[in-house]
Image (spheres, helix red, strand yellow):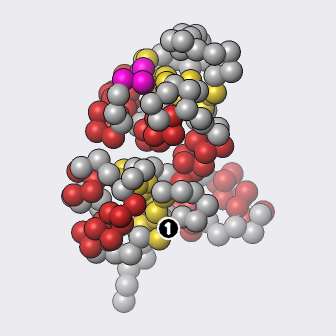
Amino acid sequence: MEEDAPTLPLPEPFLQFLEANDLDPSIYTAIDSTPRFIRLKPGFDACVEEVEKEVKCKLEKVQWLQGFYSLPPHVQIAGSRAYQEGKIYGIDASSGAAVMALNVSPGDHVLDLCAAPGAKLCMILDLLGDLGSVTGVDVARHRLAACRTMLQKYALGDRCRLFVADGTTFSVIPVGSRSDCKSLSNS
C-alpha cells in the first residue's frame, strides 16, 4: 500500500476559509503536490528535448507563458547540463506572469522590491535586451547574495543594480531614467 504524501499543517482560520469556499485543503498541504516551473532563456527552445532526456520526464509547456514549462515536483534540474550552462532556471509561473503584466520594453527602467532570489530580475533583463536597467532591492543581505549569484549565471551585462534596503524607504533613481519607471513588488 502506498503511503500518503507528507503534509504541512495549516492554521485553523485558513482551514475554515477553505471549507467555507468548498476548497480541498490537500492542494495546500501536500508537500509534493505543487508543480514546479522552469524558464528557457530566449534562444534555447531546442534544448527542451535535451532537458527531458536528462531529467527523465516530459516537460509540459505552459501555453499562456512563453518559454515556461512545468515539471513534476520530484524532478531535480540542478544536475542537468542545460541548468549548469545557464540555459534554464527555476521560476514560478506566478512570478513570470507578474513580469509579463509589466509589459517591459527595451529602454525601460524597472524596480523589483523583495527581489530575491532573482529569477524575475533575470527574466526582466532578457526582456530589456541591450537597453534599460533593473534595480533589485531586498532587505536581507544573504538573500540579495542569491540574486547576485543568479544574475552572474543567467544574465549578461551590467544593467542590474542590487541594494540591501527596505523597499518602503528606498529612493535611488535609475541612472539615465525617465519619469515612467516600472515597478514590480512582491509585498
Mark 1 surroundings within 10 Å by alpha-carbon count, few (fewer than 14), some (14 through 19), many (20 or more): some
The amino acid pointed to by label 1 is Lys
Residue 2 is drawn in which quadrant?
Answer: bottom left
x and y, in percent, of residue 168 in the image: 61, 17
The residue wearing badge 1 is 61
Q: In this view, does 107 lie above or below 79?
A: above
Residue 53 is drawn in which quadrant?
Answer: bottom left
Count the marks: how many?
A: 1
What residue is shown at x 49% (from left), y 27% (from top)? 131
Looking at the rendering, the stretch of residues picked out in magenta corresponds to 158-162
Q: Is 160 in front, or is 36?
A: 160
x and y, in percent, of residue 144 in the image: 38, 27
What residue is shown at x 58% (from left), y 65% (from top)? 63
Q: Is residue 168 above or below residue 110?
A: above
What residue is shown at x 58% (from left), y 41% (from top)? 99
Q: Is 164 in front, or is 61?
A: 61
What residue is shown at x 47% (from left), y 35% (from top)? 129
Residue 9 highlighted magenta (yes or no): no
x and y, in percent, of residue 173 in the image: 56, 11
Is 119 on the left or on the right of 168, as rendered?
left
